[in-house]
Amino acid sequence: MTPLVLLPGMMCDARLFAPQIEAFSDDRTVWVPEVSGSDTMSGLAAAILGDAPAHFALCGLSMGGILAMEITRQAPDRVKGLALLDTNPLAEIPDVQARRGPQMERALAGKLDSVMRDEMKPNYLSDGDNRAEILDLCMDMALSLGPKVFCEQSVALRDRPDQTETLRSFDKPALALCGREDKLCPISRHELMHDLLPRSELVIVDGAGHLPTLEKPVETTRALGRWLKEVDNE
């Protein structure tokens, strides 16, 4: 079976993919690398490629999806399939870029918890039954990673390149998936990725926002399983 590399979103760790790790690790290697150590997408991607299997299926959510596109740009022959969840192939727009500096200043001043609580977490989720539990997990993941990683990831996101040409040239099994209620990375971005990727499936998960891996794990894992089956059969 093709090894699976999972890339978590900003200020998240492997716990973001806990249901999928449980579902897929019985019959394949599943690896969730740390997304830290550089403040550029190119540097983060190069570090992950240095430790990754020779060939692998690649899935990223949010910032992890952005990083997955950069990994695919750098090493398209090593990526056997690409799943992009609740993410964005475009460069960051100026008004979002402008918010990064004040957020980083607050994080470095010891206020990472308030940055996550007031400015980021409210945008993450739908109003599902497990919303409070997932928000608590998001806070725990963020505080575990700390302000240094927050700043590295913020700069990498702020300065990221447009990846539309990367997707247009990726002629292998692909998945574009998002929660129907995702306010950060709306359905239109995933329709764009679906249109760019020559061999992609578009999946919209009802009852989920920005983190469908946790909000709707059964539906998300089912879609990823279809994609992995296609990758394995290549």
Image (cartoon, helix red, strand yellow):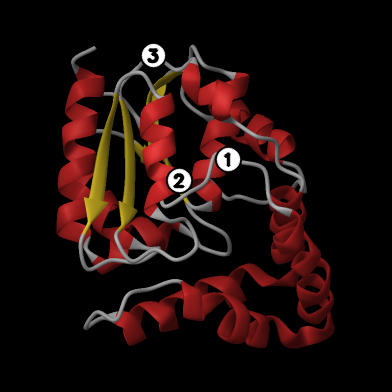
Residue 117: x %, y % from top left:
57, 85
Q: Amino acid at mark 2?
A: Arg
Mark before the other along the chain sequence, 1 or 3: 1
Q: Earlier in the sequence, mark 2 or mark 1?
A: 1
Q: Horizontal and vertical percent for residue 58?
A: 41, 33
Q: In this figure, which residue is indicated by the disc labeled 1?
A: 67
For this view, does 113 lie left or right of residue 59?
A: right
* Identity, as a three-letter code, of the amino acid under mark 1: Leu
- Circle 3: residue type: Asp
CA–CA distance between discs 1 and 3? 18 Å
Q: Residue at coordinates 49% horizontally, 81% vertically from top-left?
A: 122
Q: Nearer the viewer, residue 228 or 204?
A: 204
Q: Which mark is residue 171?
A: 3
- Quadrant of residue 48 in the image? top right
Q: Earlier in the sequence, mark 2 or mark 3?
A: 3
The answer to whether residue 42 shows anywhere in this view is yes
